[in-house]
Image (spheres, rainbow, N blue to C red):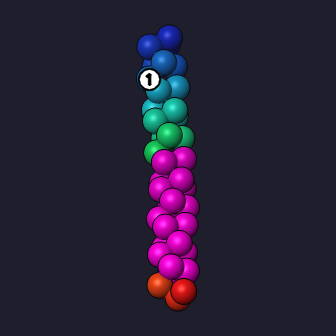
Amino acid sequence: MKLSKTLFTKAFETQQNAFYESVLGSSYWYFIKIESDSVVSQ
């Protein structure tokens, strides 16, 4: 029982990390795009 709980916790943490990474990654590229667009328009 303890082993499966550990595995479940690990899988949950991994899933959360992947979610945050994708969200942060999207925001990162979004801001880079805005920055480059504003540089081009100047």
Give the answer, above or below, for where 23 lies relative to 37: above
Q: Furthest-bottom residue in view? A: 41
Judging by the rendered image, the residue that carries numbered circle 1 is 7
Q: Quadrant of the C terminus?
A: bottom right
The residue sitting at 53% across, 72% down in the picture is 35
Say how many tags the image has.
Answer: 1
Magenta highlight range: 19-39
Q: Is residue 31 magenta?
A: yes
Give the answer, above or below, for where 11 lies relative to 39: above
Q: Residues within 10 Å of mark 1 (few under 14, many from 20)?
A: few
Q: Is residue 13 magenta?
A: no
Q: Position of residue 11 (x, y in %)?
A: 45, 32
- SS label for mark 1: helix
Q: Nearer the viewer, residue 7 or 31?
A: 31
Query: Can the viewer see residue 19?
Result: no
The residue sitting at 44% across, 23% down in the picture is 7
Give the answer, above or below, for where 12 lies relative to 3: below
The residue sitting at 54% across, 47% down in the picture is 20
Q: Amino acid at mark 1?
A: Leu
Q: Position of residue 9 (x, y in %)?
A: 52, 26
Q: Nearer the viewer, residue 9 or 42?
A: 42
Tell me which secondary structure the magenta stretch mostly adopts.
Answer: helix
